Amino acid sequence: MKRFITRLAVVVAAGALAVVLPASSASAINRVSCTESGYLTFHNAGGSLCFANAGVESVAIYGVDQIWTGNNKLTLEYVPRLGAPATSATLEKWSYWKATGETIHKITKIRVW
C-alpha cells in the first residue's frame, strides 16, 4: 500500500508540473514588414509576405510566383497546382526562385534554418 501511495504521489506531482510549466513554442518565425533584403520573402498577386528567424510554421500562402530566401535556408511543403499531391523543396541562402509557368497553388509549411 505504501508503494502505491508513493507512485501515486509521483504521478500527481508530474501531472501538476506539466500543468504549471508553459509549453515552449516550436516556432520562432515572425512575420515582418519587407524592409530588409535578408528576410525570407514570398510574392504573389496580393503583394509580398516576409518572415524572419528560424523555426517551422504551418502557413497557407496561395499563388506564389517568386521566392527570395535572403539570409535563410528554406524548406517548404507545397501543393504545386490544385488537386496535385503535396511535395517539398529546399532552397539555399540568398536564392531567388521565379515561377516559369503556373504559380505555386499553396504553400502549407515553411522551415527556416
Image (tube, grey):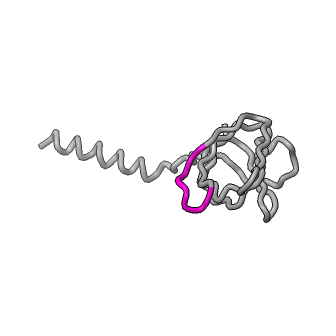
At x 59%, y 44%, the residue is 88
Q: Is residue 30 rendered to the left or right of residue 83?
A: right
At x 65%, y 59%, the residue is 105
User: Is residue 24 on the magenta stretch?
Assistant: no
User: Is residue 87 on the magenta stretch?
Assistant: yes
Q: Which quadrant holds residue 61? A: bottom right
Identify whether 83 is placed above or below 113.
below
Q: Position of residue 81 (x, y in %)?
A: 62, 58
Check the image and name the residue furthest to the bottom: 46
At x 79%, y 42%, the residue is 96
Q: Is residue 104 rendered to the left or right of residue 39?
A: left
Q: Position of residue 7 (x, y in %)?
A: 23, 42
Q: Position of residue 5 (x, y in %)?
A: 19, 45
Q: Quadrant of the N terminus?
A: top left
Q: Is residue 20 rendered to the left or right of residue 98?
A: left
The magenta-colored residue range is: 81-88
Identify whether 9 is placed above or below 64.
above
At x 63%, y 46%, the residue is 76
Q: Quadrant of the C terminus?
A: top right
